[in-house]
Image (cartoon, grey):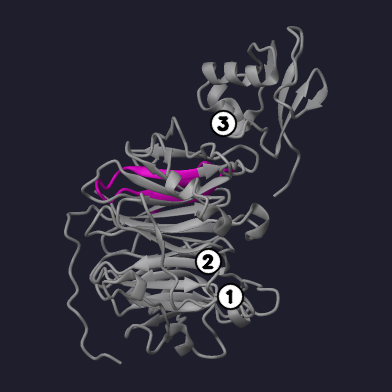
């Protein structure tokens, strides 16, 4: 294990505190935290009764909030606020598929993943949807245009499969990543459909699945068999990525030649009784050797609950060579929940805290990089996504 | 013609019923969209199909085909399909 820890940098911009953004099956809540992360003031619910897939704060201005919303009956839309939810304005043109000649028509069921664009492109946002689609806005989320290079591609469509090929709540395009060094360098994952990368702003794409495993008996050369769950780029070393996949935990260190890049399954170093199945992946903001996962039970019917009813995060400090269990403060038994792929995150403080939302409607804060867990909220609906940001 | 609007859509219309016109159900939704921008897409998807959990009744008859003809004296009801959870 590495004994030298990289220096921790404080946030570059002034902040009035943290805001925790919690998206749930029946609404959204904000928690405003003081600078010491000790006192939290709740604000919500927003969109009570609506299915909120994600709330995202634009780090470029520290005040523009986007919410991906639908109801059980009504179609999907995006709402925007510039005053932390006092007022919301609906997108005038939410994500919607275009007609693709020669391909079966599709309809967006919900926007699933929101990613703000590069700092050099104010107003630029990306959205990943279910069924899988990639959309872009250049006006702060008011109007959204489909990326035909993905949505209407005869190559992509077979990889995406159909609605019946996806998970019970629909196949998803997720983990949209914009390289902080280059606004044209994009990456995303598809739950069923693999990992894809572009170096020209999304005009052309290539797969990035070398080294990834698929379910026993299936051919790893077939892109549609690949099921990445969550991909993250390390802010402190952008040539390093971590991925939680259906088939384990991986790390990728770029070689400079995408054809030669191969994911390494670092999850094999997890304790055998725990395994390396799960959904969220969180990377340390200042230390590219450090990442966190939240394993879940994937035996038999994939219960998707805490293993043995004993929830725990696991952390590596050496790029996956070893893993440490972090469960102090979490329930010791009979806690049959888990954490969805977007529902675990960390802040960017020198010693980050982790934040997670559970399928049972709780929000937890893990102080000191997850060493000490404390409950922040209970009795919420099922938590779909948790984001944390510095308020301007 | 009268169009009954469920509470979930009052964010757009502020009231129910509203008045709208159209020779077909599809034209009716076009008129509703003109009057209340954003409403149609919450009910009709980009393939011009009624969303799965929405129901439309035209003078008491359940209809899903947007080409369904409308008479000036028809009453149209937009309804959320009964479901739980």
Per the image, the residue denoted by label 2 is A223
Q: Residue at x 41, y 67 (%)?
A: A231
Label 3 secondary element: helix
Let me know if marks 3 and 1 both belong to one chain.
no
From the top left corner, tell me how far across and down residue A200 is, in percent: 30, 53
Instruction: Work out which quarter of the rendered image holds the N terminus of chain A and state it.
Output: bottom left
Q: Residue at x 53, y 64 (%)?
A: A340
Q: Residue at x 43, y 72 (%)?
A: A243
Label 1 secondary element: loop
Q: Which mark is residue A69?
A: none
C-beta proximity under 8 Å, tags 1 and 2: no
Chain at numbered mark 1: A
From the top left corner, tell me how far across and down residue A45 is, in percent: 50, 45
Per the image, the residue denoted by label 1 is A219
Would you say residue A342 is visible in this rendering?
yes
Find the distance from the CA under tag 3 to the CA under tag 1.
Answer: 40 Å
Please provide the residue range marked out in magenta.
A41-68
Q: Is residue A43 magenta?
A: yes
Let me know if marks 1 and 2 both belong to one chain.
yes
Crowdedness near tag 1: few (<14), some (14–19) or many (≥20) residues, C-alpha within 10 Å:
few
C-beta proximity under 8 Å, tags 2 and 3: no
**Residue, far right:** B61
Per the image, the residue denoted by label 3 is B41
From the top left corner, tell me how far across and down residue B10 is, in percent: 58, 26
């Amino acid at each position: 294990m590495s004994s030298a820890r990289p220096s921790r940098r404080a946030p570059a911009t002034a902040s009035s505190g943290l805001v925790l953004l919690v998206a749930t099956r029946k609404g959204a809540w904000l928690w405003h935290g003081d600078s010491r992360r000790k006192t939290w003031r709740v604000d919500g619910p927003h969109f009570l009764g609506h299915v909120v897939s994600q709330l995202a704060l634009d780090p470029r201005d520290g005040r523009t909030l986007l919410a991906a919303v639908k109801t059980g009956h009504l179609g999907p839309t995006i709402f925007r606020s510039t005053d932390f939810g006092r007022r919301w304005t609906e997108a005038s043109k939410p994500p919607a598929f275009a007609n693709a000649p020669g391909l079966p028509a599709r309809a967006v069921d919900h926007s699933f993943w929101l990613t703000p664009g590069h700092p050099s492109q104010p107003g630029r946002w990306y959205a990943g949807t279910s069924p899988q689609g990639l959309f872009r806005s250049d006006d702060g989320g008011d109007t959204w245009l489909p990326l035909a290079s993905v949505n209407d591609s005869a190559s992509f469509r077979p990889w995406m499969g159909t609605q019946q090929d996806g998970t019970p709540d629909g196949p998803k395009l997720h983990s949209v990543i914009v390289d902080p060094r280059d606004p044209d360098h994009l990456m995303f994952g598809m739950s069923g459909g693999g990992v894809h990368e572009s170096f020209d702003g999304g005009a052309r794409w290539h797969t990035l699945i070398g080294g990834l495993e698929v379910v026993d008996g299936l051919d790893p050369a077939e892109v549609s068999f690949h099921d990445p769950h969550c991909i993250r780029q390390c802010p402190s070393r952008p040539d390093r990525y971590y991925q939680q996949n259906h088939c384990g935990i991986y790390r990728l260190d770029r070689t400079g030649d995408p054809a030669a890049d191969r994911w390494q399954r670092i999850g094999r170093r997890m304790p055998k009784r725990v395994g390396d199945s799960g959904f969220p992946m969180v990377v340390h903001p200042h230390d590219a050797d450090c990442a966190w996962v939240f394993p879940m039970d994937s035996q038999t019917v994939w219960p998707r609950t805490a293993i043995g009813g004993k929830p725990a995060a696991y952390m590596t400090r050496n790029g996956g060579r070893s893993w440490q269990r972090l469960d102090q403060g979490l329930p010791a038994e009979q806690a049959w929940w888990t954490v969805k792929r977007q529902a675990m995150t960390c802040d960017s403080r020198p010693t980050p805290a982790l934040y997670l939302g559970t399928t049972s409607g709780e929000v937890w804060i893990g102080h000191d990089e997850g060493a000490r867990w404390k409950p922040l909220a209970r009795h919420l609906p099922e938590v779909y996504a948790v984001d944390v940001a510095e308020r301007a | 013609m009268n169009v009954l609007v469920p509470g979930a859509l009052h964010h757009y219309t502020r009231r129910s019923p509203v008045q709208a016109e159209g020779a077909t159900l599809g034209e009716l939704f076009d008129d509703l969209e003109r009057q209340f921008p954003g409403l149609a897409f919450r009910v009709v998807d980009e393939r011009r199909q009624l969303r799965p959990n929405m129901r439309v009744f035209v003078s008491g008859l359940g209809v899903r085909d947007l080409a369904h003809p409308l008479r000036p004296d028809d009453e149209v009801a937009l309804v959320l399909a009964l479901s739980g959870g």
